[in-house]
Image (tube, rainbow, N blue to C red):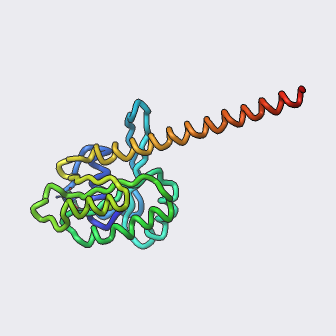
């Protein structure tokens, strides 16, 4: 998620298909891509949802965000407005997806000579919101795998932790059941 033209579609295509398109084609509606990867020895089928900026899409965002396991928040380091809109996007995801892991990408680092937002400022914003921060380029591909694999790793570790605490809870419940049947017999 993020403002228009920051490179959301380009980052998704770079990661899923390892290619880049220079000409701009606005995303119509919502695009969907998948990629299989292995993280911490777990096989993961990643579903990437790429949203366009049209009004009808905006009204559907709560629906798409509510099913998300995590989010990639993108701004363009050469566009100050795209950085200023991050609060808005973060609010959208928090309202609809809750406290899911989110990673922040400062994209178009290949044209850092036109930079309008310093890495320090973005880093401070990310630290304040407890987000991971990376500077990427969909054009050169730099840090693009780190971006998606990083967020998948956090999601996988979170799910494993959830499962572990759940099975502990179940163990305790089984113990209780055991106690109960013992008491019944006595
Ligand atoms: N120089 C440069 N251009 C990029 C990069 N990522 C995207 N673009 C260009 O920025 C424009 C908008 O990209 P797009 O992925 O459609 O943005 P979206 O609206 O956020 O999905 C396109 O012309 C892309 O070629 C990048 O990392 N570096
Ligand atoms: Mg797009």
Depth order, front residue of 168/53: 168
Asked if 35 appears above or below 92 in the picture, the reply is above
| Quadrant of the rendering where the C terminus is positioned | top right
In the displayed structure, 163 sits above or below 49; it is above
Q: Is residue 179 left or right of residue 95?
A: right
**Corner quadrant of residue 168:** top right
In the image, taking residue 48 as reference, residue 76 lies left or right, namely left
> What residue is drawn where x is 37% and y is 64%?
52
The location of residue 51, given as percent across then percent down, is 39, 61
* Picture quarter with the N terminus: bottom left
How many marks can you see?
Answer: 0
Above/below status of 50 relative to 145:
below
Picture residue at 66% right of the left edge, 36% below the top: 170
Residue 54 appears left or right of 10: right
The quarter of the displayed image where residue 83 is located: bottom left
Quadrant where ligand 2 appears: bottom left
> Foreground: 62 or 156?
156
- Measured as percent of width and height from the top left, residue 33 is found at 39, 48
Residue at 47% across, 59% down: 65
Please state which of residues 165 and 31 is positioned toward the viewer in this rendering: 165
Residue at position x 37%, y 69% from top? 87
Residue 71 location (% of width, % of height): 40, 55
Give how far across and how far down residue 20 sits, in percent: 22, 51
Q: Is residue 31 left or right of residue 137?
A: right
């Amino acid at each position: 998620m993020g403002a228009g033209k920051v490179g959301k579609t380009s980052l998704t295509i770079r990661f899923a298909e390892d290619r880049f398109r220079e000409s701009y084609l606005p995303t119509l509606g919502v695009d969907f891509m998948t990629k299989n990867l292995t993280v911490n020895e777990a096989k993961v089928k990643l579903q990437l949802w790429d949203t366009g900026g049209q009004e009808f899409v905006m009204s559907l965002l709560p629906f798409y965000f509510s099913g998300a396991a995590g989010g990639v928040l993108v701004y363009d380091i050469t566009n100050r407005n795209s950085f200023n809109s991050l609060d808005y996007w973060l609010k959208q995801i928090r309202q609809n997806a809750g406290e899911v892991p989110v990673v922040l990408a400062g994209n178009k680092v290949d044209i850092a000579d036109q930079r309008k937002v310093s890495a320090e400022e973005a880093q401070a914003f990310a630290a304040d919101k407890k987000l991971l921060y990376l500077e990427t380029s969909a054009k050169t591909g730099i840090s693009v795998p780190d971006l998606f694999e990083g967020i998948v790793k956090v999601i996988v570790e979170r799910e494993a932790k959830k499962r572990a605490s759940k099975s502990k809870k179940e163990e305790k419940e089984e113990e209780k059941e055991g106690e109960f049947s013992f008491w019944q017999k006595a």
